[in-house]
Image (cartoon, helix red, strand yellow):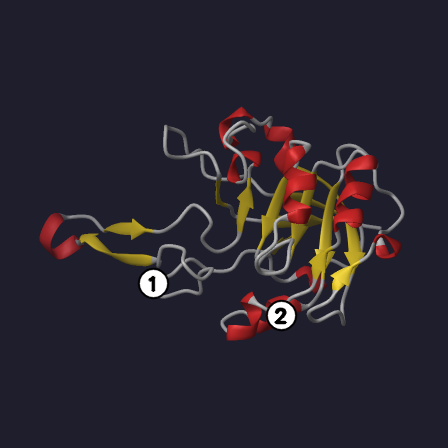
């Protein structure tokens, strides 16, 4: 089996969406002083490669812990949306094979700009009509190698997808390494409580299958 990591590393000072908490990873315990190494982590629920739960945009929608685990894994259907800097991804680009249980991964090539200012502002994004067509096909899991499914300042695609209790995985990387049949897992940290549930970082991993 061949596994492909689709996750940006979590590390101090890593890029975060403007206004989100900065990421800090520092020693809390060390072997010389305490007999073991333990790190102290400070990060936001939307840091790095992460999933958005419906609660992210509406207090009345399901939180992360209320979604079935099946929502975070499945066979990959890959959508090629390269070459669309700053433009919407229309429904005409949707691939064949969309079906309930599939995970639609949208490859734009934008992850190459990770760490640049334009990464957050000029990325391709899903048209609301495209999001509606995805939901109409029965798909409830969508991943993109961009900062958001929407352009800066908008939540139109989020409202369509999350409003249907779908999940969105953002800030993927390495989607160009998926060149054939694959399965993907996007399991989030199990964050619960009164101030959690909007989303969580994930370790996104694709398993490449023989054709």
Task: Locate residue 16, reporting x and y percent.
Answer: 44, 61
Q: Is residue 40 above or below residue 56?
A: below
Disc 1 is placed on an element classified as: loop
Q: Residue at x 68, y 47 (%)?
A: 157
In the picture, residue 196 is in which quadrant? top left
Numbered label attached to residue 12: 1
Of the image marks 1 and 2, the number of the one nearer the N terminus: 1
Mark 2, Cα crowd under 10 Å, few <14 / some 14-19 / many 20+, is: some
Task: Locate residue 184, reporting x and y percent.
Answer: 66, 45
Q: Is residue 2 visible?
A: no
Disc 2 is placed on an element classified as: loop
Numbered label attached to residue 169: none
Position of 50 with respect to 161 (left or right) is left
Q: Is residue 199 visible?
A: yes
Q: Nearer the viewer, residue 80 or 58?
A: 58
Position of 69 with respect to 135 (left or right) is left
Task: Locate residue 94, reporting x and y percent.
Answer: 84, 52
In the picture, residue 92 is in which quadrant? bottom right
Check if mark 1's residue and mark 2's residue have beta carbons within 8 Å. Answer: no
Q: Residue at x 65, y 41 (%)?
A: 159
In the picture, residue 70 is in which quadrant? top right
Q: Nearer the viewer, residue 10 or 132?
A: 132
Q: Residue at x 55, y 44 (%)?
A: 51
Task: Locate residue 146, reporting x and y percent.
Answer: 62, 60
Numbered label attached to residue 122: 2
């Amino acid at each position: 089996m061949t596994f492909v990591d689709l996750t940006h590393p979590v590390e101090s000072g890593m890029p975060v969406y403007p206004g989100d908490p900065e990421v800090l990873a520092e020693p809390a315990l060390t072997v010389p002083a305490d007999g073991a190494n333990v790190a102290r982590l400070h990060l936001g629920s939307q840091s790095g490669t992460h999933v958005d739960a419906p609660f992210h945009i509406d207090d009345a929608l399901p939180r992360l812990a209320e979604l079935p685990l099946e929502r975070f894994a499945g066979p990959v259907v890959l959508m090629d949306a390269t070459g669309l800097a700053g433009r919407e991804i229309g429904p005409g680009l949707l691939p064949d094979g969309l079906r309930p249980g599939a995970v639609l991964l949208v490859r734009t090539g934008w992850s190459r700009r990770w760490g640049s200012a334009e990464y957050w502002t000029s990325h391709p994004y899903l048209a609301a009509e495209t999001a509606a067509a995805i939901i109409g096909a029965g798909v409830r899991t969508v991943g993109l190698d961009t900062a958001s499914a929407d352009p800066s300042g908008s939540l139109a695609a989020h409202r369509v997808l999350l409003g249907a209790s779908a999940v969105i995985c953002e800030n993927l990387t390495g989607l160009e390494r998926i060149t054939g049949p694959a399965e993907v897992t996007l399991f989030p940290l199990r964050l619960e409580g009164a101030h959690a549930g909007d989303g969580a970082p994930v370790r996104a991993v694709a398993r490449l299958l023989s054709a």
